[in-house]
Image (cartoon, rainbow, N blue to C red):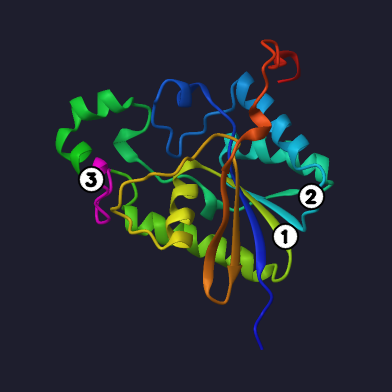
Amino acid sequence: MTEPATRIIVIRHGETDWNVAARVQGQLDIGLNPTGHWQARRLARALADERFDAIYTSDLVRAHQTAHVLARQAGLEARTVPGLRERGFGVFEGLTFAEIEQRFPEQSRRWRRRDASFGPDGGEILQSFHDRVVAAASALAALHRGQHIVLVAHGGVLDALYRAAARVALDAPRSWQLGNASVNRLLASDDGLALVGWGDTAHLDDPSPDAIDVSAA
């Protein structure tokens, strides 16, 4: 007998100052900036009519801050899952892309080439990171067969899950978006992960110049 599928919404955390500066965060614990807090509130508002059975989040603060807003609205607890944390980037963490290329040219080349066997000094190998993320998401889906869950995580986590669902190789160039506070929908079944919808950021479209309420951040 086929088990019922699990509906999954995967969300990248709201914006941080390091996102704006194109600085690699990795597993450093960087919090949301005012825009990121605003994005989290807009996200919660956009999903207000949906009913979730569970909300899970990476243990890094930028993801937890985003998940907390959604969980509070849904009347749920945002449960922490370390397996959803961003890839560890070792010596790259805290640096801009330009600084990485200048200081570690060979490692930068392998990183940009998406070498599955490569990990920056002190960081995670890409293949290991991918396997860790897919295993964590699959385990959570298995706990909630036939239910609707939310995973709040990071750009690298979203990329890994997209590749798993779309059957895209790890070394293939990325042509899909990994937007902050974006809504991305997957289905988990006995056949694995499948794409339902990706990169929805319509809830962040607001023409008013004072849309970001920093006083509430």
Principal secondary structure, stretch drawn in magenta: loop
- Residue in the picture at 41% in, 63% down: 167
Q: Where is residue 90 drawn, in percent x and y? A: 33, 40
**What mark, if any, has residue 157 been given in the picture?**
none
Query: Which circle's residue, 3 or 1, is located before the other in the chain?
Result: 3
Nearer the camera: disc 3 or disc 2:
2
Point out which mark residue 113 bears. 3
The region drawn magenta spans: 111-121
- Which numbered dot is residue 148? 1
User: Toward the viewer: 80 or 148?
Assistant: 148
Q: Is residue 120 a member of the stretch shown in magenta?
A: yes
**Is label 3 in contact with label 2 (beta carbons under 8 Å)?**
no
Q: Position of residue 130 (x, y in %)?
A: 40, 57
Residue at 15%, 38% (x, y): give it: 106
Instruction: Give the image location of residue 97, x and y in percent.
Output: 30, 28
Dot 2, how many residues are within 10 Å of its Cα: few (below 14), some (14-19), or many (20+)? Answer: few
Query: Camera-side residue: 59 or 203?
Result: 203
| Mark closer to the chain start, 3 or 2 | 2
What is the spatial separation of the Cα atoms under label 3 and label 2, in whole angstroms?
39 Å
- The image quadrant where one finds the C terminus is top right
**Residues tagged 3 and 1 counted as in contact (Cβ below 8 A):** no
Secondary structure under tag 1 reads strand
Mark closest to the chain's N terminus, 2 or 1:
2
48 to the left or right of 113: right
Asked if residue 186 lies left or right of residue 98, the reply is right
199, above or below 15, in the image: below
